[in-house]
Amino acid sequence: MYTVAQLIGGVWGAGGQGGELVVRDPADGSPVSTVPVATADEVGKAVEAARGVADGWAATAPAERAAALHRAADAVEAVAEELAAAVTAEMGKPLADARGGVEAGIGTLRQYAELAPVRGGRTLLGGGHTIDFMTPQPRGVVAAITPWNDPVAISCGLLGAALVTGNVVLHKPSERAPATGWLLARALDGALPAGVLSLLTGGGEVGAALAASDVDVVAHVGSSATGRAVAAAAARSGAKALLENGGSDPLVVDADVDPVWAAGQAALGAFANAGQICVAVERIYAHRDVAEDFADALVGRAEALRVGAGRDPATELGPLVDRRHRDHVHGQVTAAVAEGARLRTGGTLPDSPGAFYPATVVTDCRHEMALVRQETFGPVAPVVVVDSFSEALRCAADSPYGLAATVLTGSMSHAQRACRELPVGTVKVNAVFGGAPGGAAHPRRGSGQGYGYGPELLDEFTATKVVHIEAPGGGHW
Ligand code: NAD
């Protein structure tokens, strides 16, 4: 059992007068963590304390900040196994996936430690006796509000990029993975000057208080509804909002592909991490010529997955994060079936403890169904049959989201059309996952704004200043 503590003004165990939350293991319902809840007053005091050390950290040499981040990465590496176990205990994903997320996080910290000190601005071509240049500067105080579905990888990205560029950070991890956030903060804090990192815990109300506070940047990774609330709060305060939010990623299965191979891609995209990935396959547009064989093979894939607790090394499909989320997933599936969709496998609530939900394939779906249009975030593959590649692209593009999309096709011209026409941040051709390291894209529409990853995230956390210098009186120094 983890007993989470907050970190405010460099002091562990501060605050928590807002009550206590208990997180339960989604595999069996047993309690895992107790978490203090910050009050709005504590949030305000934490922001004030952070601002008090912001100038000192901003003035620290970039190479020194980078060295601190390398030490932080070492510290995270030293507790990697403990972190992965906490992820699995709190949100249920298979331990091997949790380890992968921690490794990715450590890698990101190290990348930012290497990249940040070699960044520079541009020099400008001014008059003969003038000096003009552009230089990036820290923005100041950053609120980082993170989700539970890959908590270490996501938090390391935001925290690493914000800290190494000279900002102080207040981290509010998800109330569904707070011990993970606490273990991570303990590791990072030990490598940083006191007060540069703060940890505030609790639910959405703590995130809302933080987003509305006197910070310079609010970086939120989470649902689109929350992202809109964060954007509204930032608009009122004048803070910059950086948003990486939900998606409903389409998978297009063209007429010329092997339907069994396509089903393997669809299963990977829809069922990995029980579908709880922002870029999971959420809706499938399959060409009529291959749709039936594709659906049959996808059902086979779904039924072959080994279901169990994340800590069991044999497990391929763990539970959903909790029963509240399972109700949301099941609600979308049952509504689609009531509207005429056909349940091919899964779609029933198991009579077992925890929050398990079976890998589910639903065919005869229509593009208008909520299961197709909205984010499900569960192990569900809804299949819509289309009569042409153009129809598939039209449906894929018609979405309130714009995160990513995958097209499976043997046609180069179809692949080119997909790259050109889909209004999303990431287009993948013939592979649902596996982009090159360092890639970064702008999410569109309800999926967010700004770069959430890659070297460009360093730019998001700095403000560029342009400087023009002349000698006094137009003469010489
Ligand atoms: P969420 O938005 O409910 O919660 C995320 C964080 O926001 C939590 O810390 C939560 O306490 C906080 N929060 C909740 N209400 C708030 C408010 N009104 N103001 C400020 N903060 C508030 O999201 P979630 O359920 O934790 O995560 C799942 C979602 O995250 C999915 O929609 C998924 O697609 C998305 N996600 C996106 C990316 C990406 O890179 N685009 C990555 C991972 C997850």
Image (cartoon, helix red, strand yellow):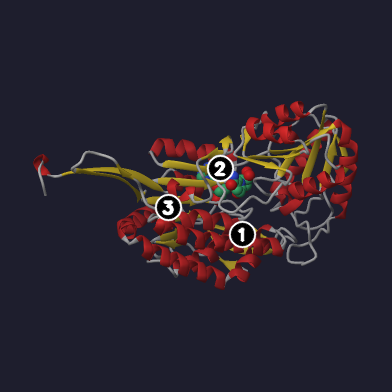
What's the amino acid at mark 2? Answer: Ala
Residue 181 picture quarter? bottom right
Residue at 87% from the left image edge and 36% from the top image edge? 290
What's the amino acid at mark 3? Answer: Val
Which numbered disc, 1 or 2, marks the residue closer to the eye?
A: 2
Q: Say whether mark 2 is within 8 Å of ligand 1.
A: no
Query: Mark 2 Cα within 10 Å, few/some/many (few <14, many 20+)?
Result: some
Q: Is residue 191 left or right of residue 415?
A: left
Whole-number angstrom distance, CA of label 1 to CA of label 3: 20 Å
Q: Residue 267, position in %: x, y? A: 79, 48
* Circle number at residue 441: 2
Which numbered disc, 1 or 3, marks the residue closer to the eye?
A: 3
Q: Check disc 2 and report its element: helix, strand or loop.
A: loop
Residue under circle 3? 43
* Circle number at residue 22: 1
Residue at 41% from the left image edge and 36% from the top image edge? 236
